Image (tube, rainbow, N blue to C red):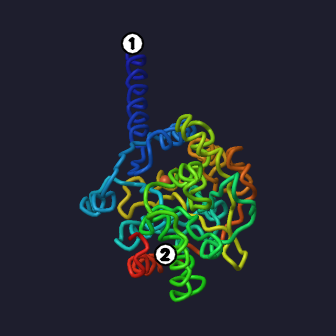
Amino acid sequence: MSFFTAARALVAATALSAASVAVQAAEVNVYTTREPGLAQPLFDAFSKETGITVNTIFVKEGLAERVAAEGANSPADVLMVVDYGNLIDFVDRGLTQPVKSEALDAAVPETLRAPDGQWFALSMRARVLYVSKDRVADTKLTYEDLADPKWKGKICIRSGQHPYNTSLIAAMITKDGAEAAGAWLEGVKNNLARKPGGGDRDVARDILAGLCDVGVGNSYYVGLMRSGAGGDEQKAWGSAINVVLPTFKDGAGTHVNVSGAAVAKNAPNRDNAVKLLEFLVSEEAQEIYAKANYEYPVRAGVAADPIIADLGPLTIDPTPLVDVSKNRKAASVLVDDIGFDN
Ligand SMILES: [Fe+2]
């Protein structure tokens, strides 16, 4: 080997190792409570497009506690969860940092993100009504209608303390005040066909069984039931119901909760974290959300799964989730005060 060839080889080797260092640094660490089946296709698509490796830590319980305990040395870049209550909890614990991104601000409706960019919704689930196909003719209902004595002994719902319901009750408090919301919740309690409990799909099951005529459930469960993803039995539950997208009595829109993400306060790969969030609201990722778990995309113009689109157009109630969140505690107290679950 001549001197020049050897030198050239050395230069090439040096360039290669510099490149591989750069590749190694191209990573982002995600802590998430979301199911791997949903999250992985999103991360794979991101890695394919950007070359950035996504290291995922699936944490079922205590995600906030874990990041807090890791402190300044936490490897977490992105915190990805369901329920805006969890996102706001991260902010309250000082675990997030503000992100200013035109792509995120343009894609995520203002009411579904923190005003200072501490968290962003990535997908939505609507709190809808399941009604008996055989016994209920109503195609338009409000949440307030659930307290109408005409439904006495006909309503099924999961625990009032479940976050899906405390969010809805908190939205009612935000709109009408605690007193009116309390009277409404008492009215709903008086109409119950059974003790609150089980899951949202059990509402459809109980409607099929004739135990109740009307119930409250999340939109994506309709997709899970009707698609057959949960088996034939659930498919039968899904076909026993019609779905009404209710509004509050002001007619403004349907209550939604969200899945979302925040950039961690001590993110070692901050730029990649922002890139990942921006990717998650891109058309490509939003389509994956719609298909994988029957969630509504947050980005306008991306179609929901046909089963969900079939429920009719969703108009989101315009109350900012940060405002609703301030009444979550009061909602929980109210549920206890009136003995809703007893
Ligand atoms: Fe759920």
Q: Which mark is residue 2?
A: 1
Looking at the rendered structure, the kind of residue marked 2 is Ser
Residue situated furthest left in the rendering: 69
Q: Which residue sits at x=45%, y=77%?
A: 331
| Count of labels in the image | 2
Q: Quadrant of residue 96?
A: bottom left
Residue closest to the eye, 288 or 135: 135
User: Residue 340, how many percent across, how many down?
Assistant: 43, 73
Task: Locate residue 15: give its quadrant.
Answer: top left
Q: How far across and down, in percent of the image, does residue 288 sit?
A: 60, 43
Does residue 247 lie above or below 338 as drawn?
above
Place residue 93 in its image quadrant. bottom left
Cα–Cα gap, marks 2 and 1: 72 Å
- Picture coordinates of residue 58, whole percent (x, y): 36, 46
Residue 27, above or below 48:
below
Q: Name the residue under label 2.
A: 325
- Which quadrant holds the C terminus? bottom left
Q: Is residue 193 left or right of residue 105?
A: left
The secondary structure type at the circle numbered 2 is helix
Residue at image x 53%, y 35%? Answer: 231
